[in-house]
Image (cartoon, rainbow, N blue to C red):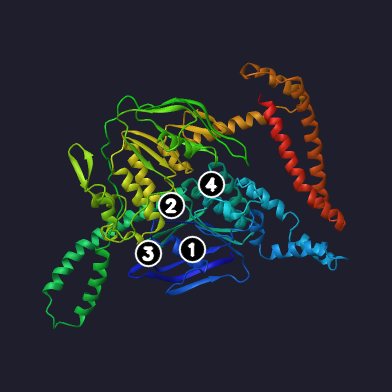
Amino acid sequence: MITYLDVQHLNKRIGDLVLLDDVAFSIGEGHRVGLIARNGAGKTTLLNILSGKEDYESGSVVYRNDIKVGYLEQSPEFDPTLSVIDACFAQAGELSDLIARYEKCLQTEGTPGIDALIEEMERREAWDFELRAKQILSRLNITDFSQPIGQLSGGQIKRVALANVLLSNPDLLILDEPTNHLDLEMIEWLESYLRREVKALFMVTHDRYFLDRVCSEILELDQQKIFSYKGNYAYYLEKRAERVAAEASSVQKAQNLYRTELDWMRRMPQARGGKAKYRKDAFYELEKLAKQRLEEKAVRLQVKTEYLGSKIIEAQYVSKTFQSESRGDKVILKDFYYNFTRFEKIGIVGGNGTGKSTFIKMILDEVRPDSGRFVVGETIRFGYYSQNGMEFDNQMKVIDAVRNIAETVDLGGGRRITAMQFLSHFQFPPARQQDYIYKLSGGERRRLYLCTVLMQNPNFLILDEPTNDLDISTLQVLEEYLADFRGCVLVVSHDRYFMDKVVDHLFVFKGEGDIKDFPGNYTQFRAWEALQEEEEKAQPKAKVELAKKENTYTSERKRKLTFKEKQEMEALEADIAKLEAEKAEIETALSSGTLSVEEITAHSRRLPLLTEELEEKEMRWLELSEI
């Protein structure tokens, strides 16, 4: 095996907080490694050390000579004046320089050195770089390639950065939360891409299905040390449980022996030396082990919810459209009707930009519908966890931020717990509760925000992307809380594992106001979708079969195709066939190695235009076929 990265005896502390203590691991060719740790344990710090952005106290970080490393940061930055496609070229390194030299040569009289450049372009597979860039960006729902980076949202910038790092074709790919800001289809595409294309991978993610399907090894950063598990996420869960049980047993034995040794230390005369010194040294080692704290939570937290009446929320034929001069009207809801029932747990899924967050804001009366209304029951008490989070006073202590809301939390049945106990359940140990908020990591701040929402005893929880930046152990606590929650839950999330554990059914936002109510969880929905796709593929493409299919679904259509629409559809079928044939011909020619410079240039310019035209005609054909 070729070792790409070797980390040995790595130590790092920030002030008096030890993050990494004698950490060691290695990553080789073909390895796909996931890093798991609690928020604030030092995951991002470790990735910053590996990328050279942060220093460390001692140890070594050694990369193999001449390997190419790609790093996706949690919050990437670009020159805001660059266009999306130029940002991709700017990150392409030597390949970008090669393409620039080739373009400059074409514009120079006599094209000096063109033969050598063509040979290098072929050897480095640079001909289709721009096409690949557009394909990957399109898969990540970035379609306006000329749009300035400065006009993009934070999530869109993260997706451009992901496209860039994939385009660089590195030997070792390091990813910090790659699934944040991706919708479910993008995540599934990225899973497939990483399994197929990447030579070696090291990533931090809290998406458990993603870990299970992509990674073949799990590293856990716990108690400032690294524990390695040679298997996927399911294997990690099994072996970690065994490790924690063994550690608990060792700590219990050490505590029993510690009491005996402590009694001996107290009785030992100060003047006694010799063999007693060895026993004293052993005592101090034993003391470290005995005082080790295992913070595994076995008790489920059941918080009292406010009384929930029979009237919940009724969406009465709600419509909403956003109007834009540059991009046309965007339909979010169209005559949407739904009557929420007691204790149901609904998941909301759909592509980015289909209106999921707007739907939530209309329920909360933060956005007004164009027509229709949401009627909210009198007993409803909302708890809203938003993507933007809560603004905290950075100079306030963690415990004070919670006590400002309530000193105690009502568990029902006369039982109450203090704010400190509530924070401990969400993995803020007493020492961390006394820290100032500015010392918290991004994930810890999100966890604190979650605590402030849940402790207010809501009976209708609305969670907008609650899984972003939360560690796996916090997600497990949240999943248990929601399983016992005696109220309604409406959750938007791209975490498939979380959705499968929490929701009873789904609102599937398909765009243009089309919302389907699916009776099942996300895995069941994807299985149903896959079955539908297989059935569609099995339908013959011949015109006779198309006619039969049209007749089969005539009763479900609002109207029949007009004579002109039928003519347009037939013309589209002919055009699509011609364009597909031309595309295949160009692709074959480009890979033949027999074309002249002028032919290569002409084909390279024609191919993206051809692809775009083909997609437009296919989309129009689909629109007509669904009438």
Above or below, 370 against 296 in this view is: above
Residue visible at 78% across and 47% down? 607
Chain-order first, disc 2 or disc 3: 3
Residue visible at 39% across and 47% down? 475
Numbered badge on residue 192: none
Name the residue that disc number 2 marks. 469
Q: CA distance from mark 3 to mark 1?
A: 15 Å
Badge 3: how crowded within 10 Å, few (<14), some, or many (20+)?
some
Residue visible at 82% across and 62% down? 107
Chain-order first, disc 4 or disc 3: 4
Q: Secondary structure at mark 4?
A: loop
CB under 8 Å between discs 2 and 1: no
Q: Secondary structure at mark 2?
A: loop
Q: CA distance from mark 4 to mark 3?
A: 30 Å
Nearest to the observer: residue 195 or residue 552: 552
User: Can residue 594 be seen from the camera position used here?
Assistant: no
Q: Amino acid at mark 2?
A: Asp
Q: Nearer the viewer, mark 1 or mark 4?
A: 4
Q: Nearer the viewer, mark 4 or mark 3?
A: 4
Numbered badge on residue 224: 3
